[in-house]
């Protein structure tokens, strides 16, 4: 919308921005093959471009006509370009100083203000307020409670550390953003520009369209595919929900339920490899492991999430007697595969190269080249010069939010490292938990959900990875399980009322009540609130352990997830509607099967088997609904 308005009045400006975006993307494709530049240059180029796009395409005052504020935005653009270019020019000198010269400090102060303003425009006030609080914490350390007290730092030193050194804004978050995340976003933009979204939605359409509750199952599968391209809940809701939600409503789903299904399905894109909301790249860097290892660990919990979701929407269709779509309205599977065949080899190549422990940047680069070349042989999805240019520009548009989030998170990360706050928080959490891992996990979950409500999943994860994960690891939790735990709950905050942004986006499309939509999205995604606890206590679910243990854990967990889905809906495939006692029993049995342990598996089998036996042959009053027999 804003871009169209600018095109009407400032066509030359929009053209120049597009050229800047394309040039920046080409710059990072170059570094993926020939090697990175110096840290400030490598990280500064993407920050500069994204700040320019932020101030031009995100007005100072939303939903209001631009007047004098447009000149303010242009002034901020010029300041951004000048300051970032100055820091790149002064890089080597800045690395040798403890406190910058007056000119350096002035530039640093301007950069800090610019970052905070860009954060306000893209992510809202919560992350701005948190960042400012951390800056004040650095100044007021001697006046803090004893457990988080420190000696305090002068403002000049804090400003130098945050803006002029490679430990704050230009720290680890911006490093990952300007390398791995950038290349994956390029790959995503190339796939989407080529027409991959249509391919990924037509596949589930052709397979599940005619079955009961077909549109809901299409939403589940299409959103899981979309998660490999965007890693964004709102983007998933916008891309797939615009046609799956109307279809669900048309076939009989209530508006709030249609929105809830799409929101829950889109949220799964955050935890579905390979993109995982871009936090997987940061996680790999923090843990010092390969990106492939993170994807492998996250795979089974993501599968369990979508299995539960699939069962839930299927039983919803059974209960409401919702049928599929007419065959003549659906794409033909064979034709879909023939037209979009070129999309599969690049994805396969990317996965293979990551498995072979290639650099994620190089793996993405070769996958991008392959998708471009193969698209030339597809009539419907051919990428000519115009589409290639669109993909280069789209990359920067997709990078704005991620880059600004990383810059803002860099402020917080820098202050945590400077003040040693992590050790104080660790001590506080340990004392509150009393040495209990379970209590610590519950506290961590609450913090993750609250923080996730006010910022992106990536920003929330970055903060919690420094403050909470070390405490979990200290108490014996496997490192990858600890990091995935906090990441999962940061993601789920987007469908957790009262601030469920993903559900609100879906409600807007569905025309339903946002709170009702959010509650139902939370309910049908309930399995995701349980599984993280299980893989913390037994990391077989994150592929830690022997092959036999992992295989058994996967099989029993999938069966248990199906049972848990039946508990959520209060409906058995073998019987029909069940009452509260049977729901509780089959839910407990399902949890026993999900937890990877022989004793709990046997208990789960016993409980689930008993419920099925009683509902089938020995109906007990108060346990089953006799009317459904």
Image (cartoon, rainbow, N blue to C red):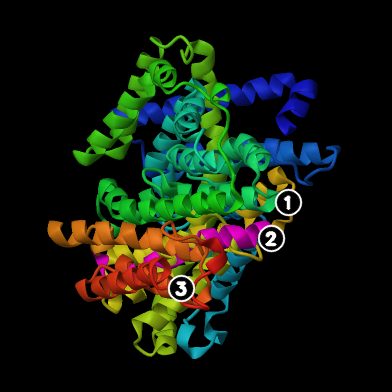
Element under disc 1: loop
Q: Residue at x 45, y 27 (%)?
A: 191
Vertical position of residue 455 compared to residue 192: above or below: below
Mark 1 neighbour density, 10 Å: few (under 14) some (14–19) many (20 or more): some
Element under disc 3: helix
In the image, which disc is placed on residue 582? 3
- Which of disc 3 and disc 2 is earlier in sequence? 2
Q: CA distance from mark 2 to mark 1?
A: 8 Å
Of badges 1 and 3, the one in the foreground is 3
Q: What percent of the width, then of the height, locates residue 627?
A: 57, 65
From the viewer's side, name the closer residue of 98 and 510.
510
Q: What secondary structure do most residues of the magenta stretch adopt?
A: helix
In the image, which disc is placed on residue 512? 1
Q: Residue at x 50, y 11 (%)?
A: 385
Q: Are marks 2 and 1 in contact (CB under 8 Å)?
A: yes
Q: Magenta region: which residues? A: 516-539
In the image, which disc is placed on residue 516? 2
Residue 153 is covered by the magenta coloring: no
């Amino acid at each position: 919308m804003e871009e169209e308005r600018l095109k009407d009045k400032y066509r030359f400006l929009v053209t120049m921005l597009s050229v800047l975006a394309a040039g920046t993307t080409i710059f990072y494709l170059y570094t993926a093959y020939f090697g990175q530049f110096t840290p400030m240059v490598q990280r500064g180029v993407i920050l500069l471009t994204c700040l320019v796009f932020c101030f031009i395409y995100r007005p100072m005052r939303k939903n209001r006509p631009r007047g004098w504020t447009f000149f303010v935005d242009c002034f901020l653009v010029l300041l951004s370009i000048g300051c970032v270019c100055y820091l790149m020019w002064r890089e080597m000198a800045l690395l040798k100083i403890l406190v910058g010269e007056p000119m350096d400090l002035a530039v640093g102060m301007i950069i800090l203000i610019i970052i905070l303003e860009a954060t306000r425009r893209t992510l809202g006030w919560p992350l701005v307020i948190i960042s400012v609080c951390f800056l004040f914490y650095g100044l007021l350390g001697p006046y803090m409670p004893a457990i988080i007290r420190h000696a305090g730092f002068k403002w000049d030193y804090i400003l130098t550390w945050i803006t002029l050194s490679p430990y704050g804004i230009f720290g680890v978050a911006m490093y990952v953003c300007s390398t791995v995340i950038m290349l994956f976003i390029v790959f995503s933009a190339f796939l989407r520009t080529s027409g991959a979204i249509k391919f990924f939605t037509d596949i589930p359409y052709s397979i599940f369209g005619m079955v009961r509750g077909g549109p809901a199952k299409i939403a589940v599968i299409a959103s899981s595919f979309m998660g490999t391209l965007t890693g964004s809940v709102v983007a998933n809701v916008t891309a797939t929900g615009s046609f799956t939600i109307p279809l669900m409503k048309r076939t009989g789903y209530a508006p709030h339920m249609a929105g809830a299904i799409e929101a829950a399905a889109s949220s799964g894109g955050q935890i579905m490899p390979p993109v995982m909301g871009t936090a997987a790249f940061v996680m790999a860097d923090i843990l010092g492991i390969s990106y492939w290892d993170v994807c492998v660990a996250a795979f089974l919990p993501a599968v369990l999430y979508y299995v539960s979701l699939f069962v839930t929407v299927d039983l919803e269709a059974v209960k409401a007697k919702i049928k599929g779509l007419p065959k003549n309205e659906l794409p033909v599977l064979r034709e879909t595969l023939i037209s979009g065949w070129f999309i599969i080899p690049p994805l396969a190549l990317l996965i293979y190269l990551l498995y072979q422990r290639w650099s994620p940047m190089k793996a993405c680069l070769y996958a991008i080249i392959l998708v471009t070349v193969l698209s030339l042989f597809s009539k419907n999805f051919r990428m000519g010069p115009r589409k290639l240019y669109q993909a280069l520009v789209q990359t920067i548009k997709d990078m704005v939010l991620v880059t600004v989030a990383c810059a803002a998170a860099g402020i917080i990360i820098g202050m945590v490292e400077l003040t040693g706050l992590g050790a104080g928080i660790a001590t506080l959490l340990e004392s509150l938990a009393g040495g209990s891992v379970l209590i610590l996990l519950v506290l961590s979950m609450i913090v993750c959900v609250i923080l996730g409500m006010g910022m992106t999943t990536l920003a929330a994860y970055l903060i919690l990875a420094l403050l909470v994960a070390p405490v979990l690891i200290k108490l014996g939790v496997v490192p990858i399980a600890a990091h995935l735990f906090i990441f999962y709950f940061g993601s789920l905050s987007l469908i957790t009322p009262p601030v469920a942004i993903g559900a609100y986006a879906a409600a807007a499309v569905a025309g339903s009540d946002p709170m009702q939509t959010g509650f139902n999205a939370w309910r049908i995604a309930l399995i995701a609130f349980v599984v993280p606890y299980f893989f913390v206590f037994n990391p077989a679910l994150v592929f830690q352990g022997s092959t036999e243990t992992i295989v058994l854990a996967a099989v029993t967990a999938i069966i248990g997830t199906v049972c848990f889905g039946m508990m959520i809906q209060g409906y058995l495939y073998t019987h029909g509607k069940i009452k509260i006692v049977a729901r509780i029993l089959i839910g407990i049995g399902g949890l026993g099967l999900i937890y990877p342990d022989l004793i709990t598996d046997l208990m789960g089998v016993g409980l689930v088997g008993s419920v099925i036996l009683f509902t089938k042959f020995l109906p007990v009053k108060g346990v089953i609904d006799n009317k459904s027999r």
